[in-house]
Amino acid sequence: MLEAIWIAIKVFIVINIVLIHVAYVVYFERKVIGHMQARMGPMRVGWHGLLQPIADGIKLFFKEDIMPSAADKPIFYVAPIIGVIAALSSFAVIPFWEGFSIANLNIGLLYILALSSVGSYSVILAGWASNSKYSFLGGLRSSAQVISYEIAMGMSLVGIMMFSESASLSDIVNAQSEGWFIWTQPVAFFVFVMAALAETNRVPFDMPEAETELVAGYATEYSGIRFGLFFMAEYAAMFLMSALLAVCFLGGWRGPDFWIFSAVPGIVWFMIKIYAFIFFYFWVRATLPRYRYDQLMGLGWKIFIPLALANIIITGLIKIL
Amino acid sequence: MTAPELIKKIFLIEILQGLALTLKHFFMPPVTRQYPKEKREPFPGSRGLHALVRDDETGEARCVGCGLCAAICPSQCIYIYTSEGDDHKKIVDRYEVEVLRCVFCALCVEACPYAALALTDHYEYSGYTREEFYYTKDMLLENWDKYMAGSKGKDYIKNFWGPKSSYFTGPVAAKDKEGLEK
């Protein structure tokens, strides 16, 4: 009983901290992209626009929740909730610092991959249920994108599992005490970063949203807090993918182990790594245009999957020898 | 495909160049001007709200009601009503500008042979009704007092929008120009 309460408290804390970070990641994105375009980003609400995410949140809460008359109502209601649940429940297995994770699952990696696939269901279902052509195209693109990227993504992590001989995230971090996997698995790192971009529907692989072509893709018919939930799910998924990258390739909570750095708590290193990846996401968004749809499929099937397969074979050979 | 091309493609050289460019811009100061907080001084000769020039000697409008400004106005937003006074003198009863229709081309100012009309550098005016932007003669004269006080108005006319007729016509116009410069 006591343990259940303790877990509930942990869940509450983690979810709240993640949601605050998600809100401020949006602010961070607007600032980063603004400065890359010689603008300032939000400046008015609060000091340097620091209260902007709160203002946005309040606005989204009080906007009208519009329901298209031709929509498939139950699915339309459920779709954004699926997205948020899938994105947030993945944080259960992330080891934030040594010995702290809500559930230290021995198949943590598989759990995250499975939930990220569930997350793309929310996009597909939203596209279907909206009964709008733009939404439907967005949903179709999302499903096509998922099948071309999830394979490469899963296979790029096989090398990691081979080296650490475990699928538990804390074991993976512990296996990197000698050296980060980014040095031993550079190809897997490259494939995973690209797949993570596609998985979270970020530029240059933001086909399902594609605001220049499809209005807002799957979210076209959504308004108010339901749109906000999609937004939240997208940024939470981005946060999750950055955390996964940090755990699998950059040694999670481990920092440099000398001089003053060894006194810095693990969570700080972990957050620095996560935010480095998030910055990279925004940086890419400010730089690259969207890939064409067929180019994206070609990239997924013809380059990333063979690369990931070759990586598995070479890693296996090295492991045997 | 040659070897350098292949290397270029594999290591995403061009994408990296693009990333370097955006990163460079990330550290440049933004060009944004935080408008209501920091306002830019209008450039000299800029075209803002209309005004009728008040003559220093008579204290009245310099306008004689010839109607050239209304004739050249491309958006037809100037309305002039005149009547005959004593000694066949032309009196300008009403001189009205519908500012919402104006396109601020300043053709009226250029057309005026007496430099009786000006566009001030005041550009921040707003209102809730259309009627607020229907400027009558008194309001236009008031604009001159407000935004072109002192030597500002004279400099404005002399340097930018003075009657071009003085460049081409005889001594009368030239004298007029001198009068303006005084």
Image (cartoon, coloured by chain):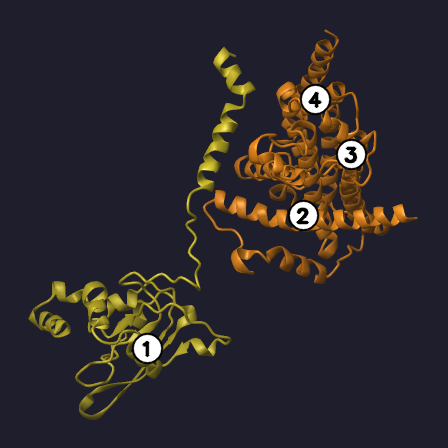
Relative image position of residue B80 (x, y in whole percent):
32, 79
Q: Secondary structure at mark 1?
A: helix
**Mark 3 and mark 1 on one chain:** no
The residue singled out by tag 4 in the image is A301
A139, A307: nearer the viewer: A307
Between label 4 and label 3, give the one nearer the viewer: 3
Comparing labels 2 and 4, the label whose residue is closer to the camera: 2
Q: Amino acid at mark 1?
A: Asn
Residues tagged by mark 1 and mark 2 found on one chain of the structure: no
For the residues tagged 2 and 4, is the chain the same? yes
In depth, the one of A158 and B55 nearer the eye is A158
Q: CA distance from mark 1 to mark 4?
A: 70 Å
Give the residue type at disc 3: Ile
Q: Nearer the viewer, mark 1 or mark 2?
A: 2
Q: Chain of mark 4?
A: A
Secondary structure beneath disc 3? Answer: helix
The first of marks 2 and 4 along the sequence is 2
What's the mark number on residue A22?
2
Q: Which residue is mark 3?
A: A112
Contact between marks 3 and 1 (CB within 8 A): the answer is: no
The C terminus of chain B lies in quadrant:
bottom left
Residue at the spot 43% in from the left edge and 61% down from the top edge: B35
Residue B82 seen in the figure: yes
Q: Residue at x 80, y 41 (%)?
A: A102
Within the image, what quadrant is residue A246 found in?
top right
In this view, B11 is above or below A20: above
Q: Are marks 4 and 3 on the same chain?
A: yes
| Circle number at residue B143 | 1
